[in-house]
Image: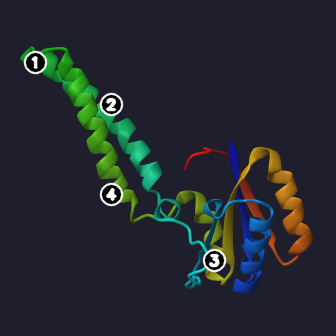
Amino acid sequence: MRHRLYFFLPDIDSARRSLDDMLLSRIEQRHIRFISAARLPPDMPEASFLIKTDVLHGATTGMIVGAMLGMTFGALLIGYYEAGQATVLVTTLMGILFGAWASSMAAAAIPNSHLKAFYPDLEKGRILMIVDVPARRVEEIETMLAARHPEMRFGGEEPHIPVFP
């Protein structure tokens, strides 16, 4: 399992130095992302669409609601029209797919609810560095960054990030 660490950096130069330190600490670049209100230079890995928006949360919620509505609709079809029992399975699967699609489309326009607490600092011009590190290395990475970057501010930790994103 990985833990997601959040750090605030005051400027681009500090962000570049932090990126270099993370790479030297053998954290792969695909596990390091930056978010800024201003445009980031092309050599810095910017956070993906899935991290910046609530698409994953929306899809999950849509799947749950769609499954419940699909099962209900399937049960009603069996009760009133004497359809086969496979109807419930088919309507549930259709509900899951439609719910995930519709909710993720709506959630694509909404900023990530996990990052809501960070928006005031981002609006002040700070840069948010998001790093996914193995659970056993969390303390080592935090200590290293605190020692090398006194200007950096720790923004929090989110446990249980899957190894394969």
Q: Is residue 140 left or right of residue 124?
A: right
Amino acid type, residue under disc 4 in the picture: Met
Residue at image coords 32%, 32%: 67
Between discs 4 and 1, the one toward the N terminus: 1
Mark 2 vs mark 1, CA separation in Å = 18 Å
Check the picture and name the quadrant holding the N terminus.
top right
Mark 4 vs mark 2, CA separation in Å = 19 Å
Q: Which x, y percent locates residue 107?
A: 39, 58
Q: Which residue is mark 4?
A: 105
- Residue 122 — which label? 3
Q: Which residue is mark 1?
A: 80
Between discs 2 and 1, the one toward the N terminus: 2
Amino acid type, residue under disc 1 in the picture: Tyr
Q: Which x, y percent locates residue 140?
A: 87, 55
Residue at image coords 20%, 18%: 86
Of residues 145 and 80, the one nearer the viewer is 145
Between discs 3 and 4, the one toward the N terminus: 4
Mark 4 vs mark 1, CA separation in Å = 33 Å
Q: Which quadrant of the view contains residue 123?
A: bottom right
Q: Which residue is mark 2?
A: 68
Between discs 1 and 3, the one toward the N terminus: 1
